Amino acid sequence: MALQTIPVPRVVRREGVVVAQHIREGRFQRSLAIIAALSSLLGGLDVTYEHYRGSYSQRVMYSPIVITPLLALVGVWAAFNRRVARTLLPLASIALLVDGVVGFVFHLRGIARKPGGWRLPLFNLIMGPPIFAPLLLSIGGFLGIIAALLRREDDPAEDRPTPSPLLLDRKGIVHRALVGTAAPSWLPRGIAREGIILDRDVREGRFQKLLAGAMGVSAILNGAEVWYSHYKNRFSFRVQWTPIILTPFLIVAGFGALFSKRIARTLLPITSLLAIINGTVGFFFHARGIARRPGNPRQIVYNVAYGPPIFAPLLFAATGFMGLLAALLRRTSK
């Protein structure tokens, strides 16, 4: 008996086509601003109890606790206000990116200061502060910067950046700038020109390679953090191996999409969707692990702080979301 196609309501099909079209044309600023806000909030909650475990021994440990809710608030505000999306959203996103880099330096220093330092790298990496966690926190900032460059869903499809008169660079090569996207005069001409081109590509949905590469980097960081966390738990459950096994495929898909359009259209969306599913399943297992700790629900705060990191799997899912989003975008070249 032949299998019949599952009927999909016409409204759902139409909305799906509209969403995909908006993404290809770079018209999803509101949606991505909300996603950046949610990513920042989840990362901030994860950092809150990680630093609680560290007793907030240094004042700098409070910085992500302040910046992440700020970006979450600005991201939601930007979804309703065009001016906020162009001004406050990139500032808050850059602040989170910088804070992630600073946190990475402090985590490196924390590992170096443990007995034996880098002479006992494996032991101190496992028992010291999670080295890549601050960089993972920066994912929300990266998404916020991309959102600030995008067009909004209600912008007309034919609203393409208007070409301006031709400009010459220092080598005499002709380039075309974009009206309304002039870079600050103090920037070197080459950097200014590249910034204008990037702004144009993002607004037109032509930055697949950039987002795919970012997904590949995020997969490396996430994979390292997952291995770090599950190794400390001695891989007590077989399901803990699934993100470890999936990570190399995500890395290959992300960086492979830089060079192959076929990979970007096949392997990238498949592995990204698997990462989203895996992160969701991991969130369920982490929540179950907390629920099974002694004292629940009376000791829920203690168990959340010292149980499995409940929001960490969702950051793995966020990596998959970046890859899925990249797969829907257009390319600057083949």
Image (cartoon, grey):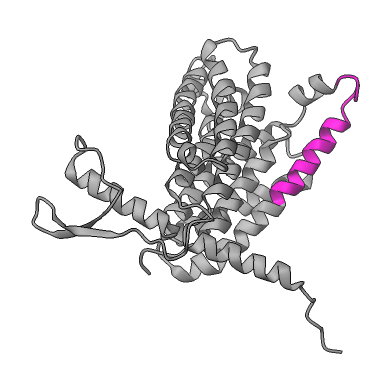
On screen, residue 184 above or below 213: above
Does 284 appear in magenta? yes
Is 60 or 233 nearer to us in this picture?
A: 60
Tell me where residue 175 sits by quadrant. bottom left
Residue 261 x/y as whole percent: 45, 69
Q: Main secondary structure of the magenta part?
A: helix
Q: In the depicted view, which residue is nearer to us: 60 or 293?
A: 60
Percent x, y of residue 124: 56, 23
Q: Position of residue 18 (x, y in %)?
A: 59, 66
Task: Identify the magenta region.
Answer: 278-299
In screen coordinates, is 142 left or right of 38? left
- Left/right of residue 132 with respect to residue 87 in the rendered view: right
**How many marks overall?**
0
Report the residue at 48% width, 57% height from top: 155
The residue shown at (71%, 32%) is 309
Q: In the rendered image, is residue 9 in sight?
A: yes
Q: Nearer the viewer, residue 231 or 302?
A: 302
Q: Position of residue 36 (x, y in %)?
A: 56, 41
**Residue 129 vs residue 277, the one in the foreground:** 277
Q: Quadrant of residue 14?
A: bottom right
- Whether residue 62 appears in magenta in the rendering, the answer is no
Inspect this view and state whether residue 327 appears: no
Image quadrant where one finds the C terminus:
bottom left
Residue at position x 52%, y 45% in the image = 218
Q: Is 14 above or below relative to 323?
A: below
- Residue 42: quarter of image: top right
Quarter containing the N terminus: bottom right
